[in-house]
Image (tube, grey):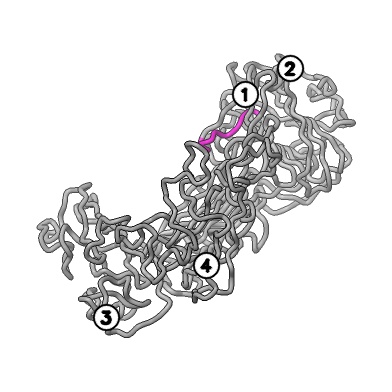
Amino acid sequence: MKKIVFILICFSAALIISCGDSGSSEKCESSFDCPIGKVCSNGMCVSEGSADDGSGDGSNGEIPDEGNGGGSNGGSSGNHDGGDTAPDDDSDSATDPEDITGTCEPGKTQKCGYQGPAGTEDVGPCKAATRTCKEDGTWGKCEGAVEPVYESGEELCTNGIDDDCDGKVDNGTEEGGCAYWNNTEVPDADADADVDPGIIDVGYTGDYDDAYQLPVDVEICNDSCIPMKADCFPSDINEGESGLCNQVDDDCDGIVDEGCSCTAGQTQPCFLGPKNFRGVGTCHDGVQTCKVTMRAGSTGVWGECMGGISPKQDVCDNADNNCNGCDDDKLCCAPPINCAYDLTADGDFLPFKYKIIDGKQIYDTGHKFNDADTATWEWTLTKGPCDIVLNKVNSFVKGGKTLAEVGDINTDNGTQNTIVSGVGFSQFKVKFKLSGNYKLHLKVTRENGEVYECEWVITVVSEGLRIELCWDRNTAVDADLHVGKNGTTTRWSNGQIAKNYEIDACYFYNCKYSASDGPHWGYDTTMNYDKDGKGPKEMRNPRLDMDNVMAGPYPENINIDNPNDGDTFRVGVYWWSGTAGVTRPVINIYCGGTLRATYGGYVSDSGDSFVYQVENFDSNHDFWKVVEVQWVGDYSSDGCILTPKLDSNGAYMVKDSIDYPFNYTEW
């Protein structure tokens, strides 16, 4: 049986907090031995900021200085400013003359004094911090120290790491040790638990049947929640052969729906983790795209599951990071950051509409630090499929401390980048041109080097049918998106001769949202988002909201806000003009805000490039017949049926040199 357990641990001593308290006379070897609010100085636990804590000033409430062995939560911060020998109170090293003069060679690194108990340095993960000489010739902070974390509970007994640095893995320090918590033999980290030749279950320890079983007679900090067991199949299987094509990693091997067939361009939500953890806590689906070789008889296979959030180490952040059903289970802490904060509490994310996220509703809401304006905030947003094709982000982001600093909500003054970072940038403003899922990562770094992080998946919702076109040679070729409705459209265009709108597809000539007339497909105009950011207004339906005429890395979008159940549409791409040469277009189909297909290729498994598959789209008046879309359900449904157009060899269909007007029904 394959063994697995997502027992997630806080490795940093700075995040481990004692549940109890003790007197000021308590002896210690390091600050790890002291209760909250106290640090180890001269072998005794003293209050932070006292005259005896090594900081030198004795001010109340001060976070201990670098070099005194203290951390904000009573644990070691890892920022011990020491040289090759133990540091003194006033300088980084008692022996290094560079420390006394305050000068050093930029780029030089140096080992700091180890602050852990004697005999634990360089045993297991324990190590001293290091520091680097900055460009101004002064030493930077000591960083990267690891000190012992005593193996006294389940979260430190099933990870295959010698956390207490005593030379033994998962042996525990209490009576009964780790075997008491595991109720099983200590696993061999190098063993192949399910005897599938050559495959080692890296990171998976503990039997499924015992996973997340807590001793009922042991007092823990959070005893109101019993974590779920990981529900995984006991051995590697081929999910396709076993009929388990269900968008989840049933056997917990890191691959979703292996062996399951799919159609070119098809996408589906996917989840990497135990199937019963899907949608629990911070866990969120990613997206995977069908990869097809585009040759006769080829069968599609699912690519990597990308863009989701999987179970990870549980940390003190008010969120269920390991997705086992319990927030901050057994960490016994008062979270300084709330990673369970709902970004959509004041409304969904919509295309062309700005949204501001107030980080002060996420970090230090209990006013433990009161340093939101002096901490460094870094907001990072992932790219969407068209962003990768265009090599440019099609969202605007900006950060600031106040609403005034992030700018007028109705203006395009964003940085149009993926990262906004700065001191005090606690507010984050974003506007998307494209639909889909985006991952937002927040990193807050305090002045003393402590770091707190959160991650969310943002779903940009556009109800109805939304079709996006992007292409690589966007400054040399004017490619145009066309969408027609079966039973209404008879020609892809009107040749710009007769205004016979009833028979034409929606495209640049007659379907811009500001045009006075256009295709009449029986839909009412709608109150929807406005690309100018001036608020919703009544707009045409269908509608082309962006037309790119060799203007650079921008998409074209066509929207049908409220299609009827059973309505069917066709999507095509026309080479209008430009410099001849192979151009590689990509089409994304969103139904009810969900990405249902990407035609023209797929995002590489690394997630940073695109594999193109449209051939022969290389000269004026070429036309790519992409897909037929049948709408199923109401306007908010994502259940559309997609039938891509492929030739007899299984490749995408491109017709050469078709002049306006041309017949829609020749499909």
Q: Of helix, strand and loop, which one carries label 1?
A: loop
Location of residue 78 by image quarter: bottom left
Give whichever of discs 2 and 3 has the lower sequence position: 3
- The image's mark for residue 329 is 4
Residue closest to the eye, 377 or 523: 377
Q: Of helix, strand and loop, which one carries label 2?
A: loop
Residue that mark 1 sits on: 293
Residue drawn at 57 percent across, 63 percent down: 340
Residue that mark 2 sits on: 648
Disc 2 residue type (three-letter): Ser
Q: Which residues are magenta?
A: 600-608
Please tell me whether mark 1 or mark 3 is closer to you in this view: 1
Which quarter of the rendered picture does the C terminus lie within? Answer: top right
**In 3D space, how far apart are the residues under numbered discs 1 and 4 (Cα atoms)?**
46 Å
Q: Of helix, strand and loop, which one carries label 3?
A: loop
Disc 1 residue type (three-letter): Thr
Residue closest to the eye, 354 or 460: 460
- 100 part of magenta stretch: no
Q: Position of residue 240 (x, y in %)?
A: 67, 36
- The image's mark for residue 50 is 3
Q: Position of residue 182 (x, y in %)?
A: 48, 62
Q: Using a 10 Å C-alpha cutoff, classify the residue at mark 1 as few (fewer than 14 neighbours), some (14 to 19) or many (20 or more).
A: some
Residue drawn at 43 percent across, 77 percent down: 19
Give whichever of discs 1 and 3 has the lower sequence position: 3
Give whichever of discs 4 and 2 has the lower sequence position: 4
Disc 4 residue type (three-letter): Asp
Q: Mark 2 touching mark 1, by CB under 8 A? A: no
**In 3D space, how far apart are the residues under numbered discs 2 and 3 (Cα atoms)?**
80 Å
Please tell me whether mark 2 or mark 3 is closer to you in this view: 2
- The image's mark for residue 53 is none
| 406 shown above or below 234 | below
